[in-house]
Image: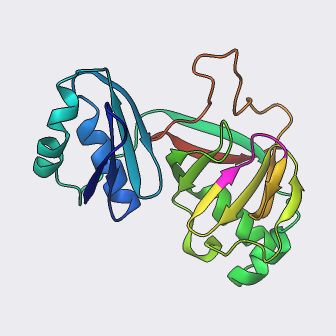
Amino acid sequence: MRLRRCGVDAVLVEVESLGEVAAARAALAGLPGLIELVPAARTVLASFEPGSAGLRQVQEVLDRADLSSPPAAGSAEVVLPVVYEGLDIELVAETAGLSVEEAVALHSGAVYTVAFCGFAPGFAYLTGLPEPLCQPRLETPRTRVPAGSVGVAGEFTGIYPRASPGGWRLVARLADDAAALFDATREPAALLSPGDRVRFEVAS
């Protein structure tokens, strides 16, 4: 673990794994003066009110924390209706050594956890992807992936909240009646937050 100061009132905590990120985020959550915690794949950014005592306690709190024991997923569960007609569903199934039906059952049968958010507003990196579906990105990224596309890449699955370039293998799309992943007029604007559990439900 390494701490890097970010300006006067923030610190970046560097760790070794997603599990340590979750544990560090949980340990820091109650510090006084904390404004925001921003987890990523191997870091947690903690920012504090100016002059807060919380910033001075970061090292001590992390030294006492057991970073090898990530907290259980939060109680919030979001169910997203999806249609499994992604452009790469046959490629994903073939790479996994499965039929398309088996790949769909595997992806929709898992319970995922939001590890962190980024890339675009509302985009959540979901862990818990079954091992056969952990596959590399496309060799050549697409210049435009439609909004609502559900993809897999490495150990993650996720949903594109808006049209953008992207190299994830696409397995599905959100159903037309699914809630918006990001709505600036909603509080909170992002549908998914770190720690949330997520399930995909095959839309009828």
On whether residue 4 falls in the magenta region, the answer is: no
User: Percent x, y for residue 129?
Assistant: 57, 63
- Position of 88 with respect to 200 (left or right) is right
* Residue plotted at (75% across, 40% down): 161
Where does the C terminus fall, quadrant-wise?
top right
Question: Looking at the image, can residue 83 be seen?
Answer: no
Left or right: residue 61 versus residue 179 is: left
> Residue at 70% across / 14% down in the picture?
185
User: Residue 13: where, in percent of width, then height?
Assistant: 32, 50
Residue 117 in sight here = yes
Q: At 20% from the left edge and 28% from the top edge, which residue is drawn?
A: 54
Q: Residue 44 location in percent, x, y?
A: 38, 46
Q: Main secondary structure of the magenta part?
A: loop
Displayed quadrant of residue 79: top right
Horizontal side of residue 93 vs 64, given as left or right: right
The magenta stretch is 158-163
Q: Which residue is more in the foreground, 15 or 71?
A: 15
Residue 177 on image: x %, y %: 82, 31
Q: Is residue 193 left or right of residue 137?
A: left
The front one of 59 and 78 is 59
Does residue 22 sit above or below 9 in this rendering?
below
The residue at 86%/63% (across/down) is 142
- The quarter of the image holding the N terminus is bottom left
Q: Nearer the viewer, residue 81 or 145?
A: 145
| Most foreground residue, 43 or 64 | 43
Residue 73, compared with residue 184, is above or below; it is below
